[in-house]
Amino acid sequence: MTQNIAHKIDFFDEKFAEKTSESKFGLCDDGGSKMAYLDFEDSQKWQGVVENENKLLVSFHPVDNCVKLKKDDGKDDEKCDGILRYSTTEGEKEQKCIVFVELKDCKTSGYWCQTAQKQIETTMKHFKNLHGLSNSYKIFAWIANKQQKGSRSTGQASDTFRKVISDKFDITLTPKIEKTFKI
């Protein structure tokens, strides 16, 4: 069980946000107490790659090591690395998009995917308590692993993740478990 103290939580604090309309950029998490960030130059560091063909304005808001999320017992709660936000136009209607992002750098198979899913799920729970989640937003959950080659998606894990999150939050979720996210 988690609690939210609305006056202490700001997922979209502009002083930590990074914005870009670059056609391709990376997301990095150096670990420790540092926040995740955008990188435009050293693709060897990129844990996740964003391909932004239409050069839409994209905002990245770090969450881990930036936003304090607490459990009921007062201890720190798990959280994903950050949130991407952008808007697209579908027909004449603007479609707002939110992407909950977890970055990994794991060579071995194992629990990294389940751990990442839990971090995103917990962040979404806090986010829902504060901002709500509705189908008026296109919601993505993106787990990127630097060690994953190409754009191979782990289908069964994605299907399971979609069902768990969609059922818990009563939303339509598009999960992606791959190194590259295409906007």
Image (cartoon, rainbow, N blue to C red):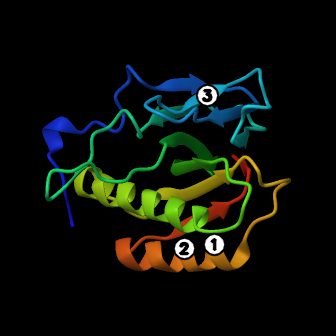
For disc 1, the neighbor class at 10 Å (few under 14, some 14 to 19, many from 20) is many
From the image, tell me which residue sits under label 3: 38
Dots 2 and 1: beta carbons under 8 Å? yes
For disc 2, the neighbor class at 10 Å (few under 14, some 14 to 19, many from 20) is many
Q: Say which of 18 and 37 sits in front.
A: 37
Mark 2 to mark 1: distance in Å? 5 Å
From the image, tell me which residue sits under label 1: 158
Earlier sequence position, callout 1 versus callout 3: 3
Q: Amino acid at mark 1?
A: Ser
For disc 3, the neighbor class at 10 Å (few under 14, some 14 to 19, many from 20) is many
Counting from the top left corner in percent of width and height, residue 73 is at: 14, 57
82 shown above or below 134 = above
Q: Amino acid at mark 2?
A: Phe
Counting from the top left corner in percent of width and height, residue 163 is at: 51, 80
Mark 1 to mark 3: distance in Å? 25 Å
Report whether 142 appears left or right of 106: left
Report whether 146 appears left or right of 31: right
- Residue 46's image quarter? top right
Q: Is residue 163 visible?
A: yes
Q: Residue at x 21, y 51 (%)?
A: 75
Label 2: which secondary element: helix
Earlier sequence position, callout 2 versus callout 3: 3
Label 3: which secondary element: strand
Q: Quadrant of the N terminus?
A: bottom left
Q: How many marks?
A: 3
Report whether 35 appears left or right of 108: left
125 shown above or below 156 = above
Q: Say which of 148 and 129 sits in front.
A: 148
From the image, tell me which residue sits under label 2: 161
Counting from the top left corner in percent of width and height, residue 95 is at: 53, 50
Q: Amino acid at mark 3?
A: Leu
